[in-house]
Image (cartoon, rainbow, N blue to C red):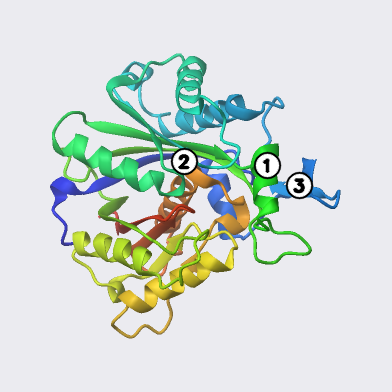
Amino acid sequence: MNASLASVLAVQRVGLVTAVGSSAPASCAAVRARIGNPSETRFTDGKGRWILAHQVELERPWRGVTKLAHMAALAIEEALQPLPRAQWERLPMMLCVAEPDRPGRAEGLDADLAAQIRQLLGVRFEQDRSAVIAHGRVGLAVALNAARKALAQGQCEQVLVVAADSLIGRSTLGAYERDSRLLTDDNSNGFMPGEAAGALLMGRANRAGAKPGRLLVTGLGFARESAHIASDEPLRGEGLAAAVQGALSEAGLAMHDIDYRVTDLSGEHYYFKEASLALSRTLRGRKESFDLWHPAECTGEVGAASGVVMLAVAEAACTKGYTHGPRILAHWANDNGHRAAAALQWQPFG
């Protein structure tokens, strides 16, 4: 690991709620076993068939922002469980949500979701450095970048990163179905919608008393792709390749140093092709194999929550020792062309 420890983030605790598990260990075990949990929604497609989705089951049939808030609160409680409740209010909360142009996005989502989470937990998180990050799938990378700046400047000792999203709503499903982007019996080039919430307690890698045995974020990269999924331009993978190269450069690594990749790919051919093109632009050394993990095959497309799911899966794999090595590349892509990547490093015990 060549990145300066002052700029390196450490994942200290994880919380996760998905359709395949009500906790991080349960969800990650299901992803490892490639178990999905699709079920019929309340909505039908243009041919009158029930739309399938990966739905989170809660104790009551909450919907909309209220359901997102309850999922987020459960994830936060899991992530912060060892921390005395009195210390929660010292934490800034970076809340990742759907991007403003996402079809079916709830009106007033940013303010309403943050307020409902605080009300459910009975906690007012540190206000000056808390923020709502409305950047969809790339939101986690944006939040991690903001968190490392705050930590490096000594503004706080820890940062709580939270994400909650759902693509299971009438307007959202209708828009994606009209664009032929949902996975159906008639369309293999699509995704199955899902919903999830997650929380990461982040701290500095060089914090006094910090112990090994944690997942580190050693590099972040950002870029734009002009040939996004809705454009008519030929896809060449230049945006994602630039984001990947930026993350690798910060970490002092090359692509051939990476042991495996974990991504937000959820079934659409465009994004798999983009990942392949980006790899061809960045890989310069020979590799016998190069695994590509995509947890969305189990959780469904969970939008802004995908990043936390990916880091939770990577952290669980490292902890339990079923990875291909300690160096991991994560990358994300939004429909509007935003791209992000993160270089991750497992620092083992002892």
The numbered disc on residue 176 is none
Dot 3: within a 10 Å radius of its alpha carbon, few (fewer than 14), some, or many (20 or more) residues? few
The span from disc 3 to disc 1 (Cα, nearest Å) is 7 Å
Nearer the camera: disc 2 or disc 1:
2
Q: Quadrant of residue 266?
A: bottom right
Q: Point out residue 177 in the picture as x, y percentages from the top left corner.
A: 70, 52
User: Position of 326 compared to 102: left or right?
Assistant: left
Query: Which circle's residue, 3 or 1, is located before the other in the chain?
Result: 3
The span from disc 2 to disc 3 (Cα, nearest Å) is 26 Å
Labels 2 & 1 near each other (Cβ < 8 A): no
Q: Give the residue type that dot 1 points to.
A: Gln
* Residue at image mark 2: 99
Farthest residue toward the front? 232
Q: Secondary structure at mark 2?
A: loop
Residue at coordinates 21% horizontally, 29% vertically from top-left? 156
User: Position of 33 compared to 339: left or right?
Assistant: right
* Residue at image mark 1: 55
Where 182 falls versus 23 (above or below)? below
Q: Point out residue 321 in the picture as x, y percentages from the top left corner.
A: 42, 61
Dot 1: within a 10 Å radius of its alpha carbon, few (fewer than 14), some, or many (20 or more) residues? many
Closer to the camera in the image, 180 or 75:
180
Q: Secondary structure at mark 1?
A: loop
Labels 3 & 1 near each other (Cβ < 8 A): yes
Q: Give the residue type that dot 2 points to.
A: Glu
Q: Quadrant of residue 323?
A: bottom left
Q: Give the residue type that dot 3 points to.
A: Ser
* Residue at image mark 3: 39
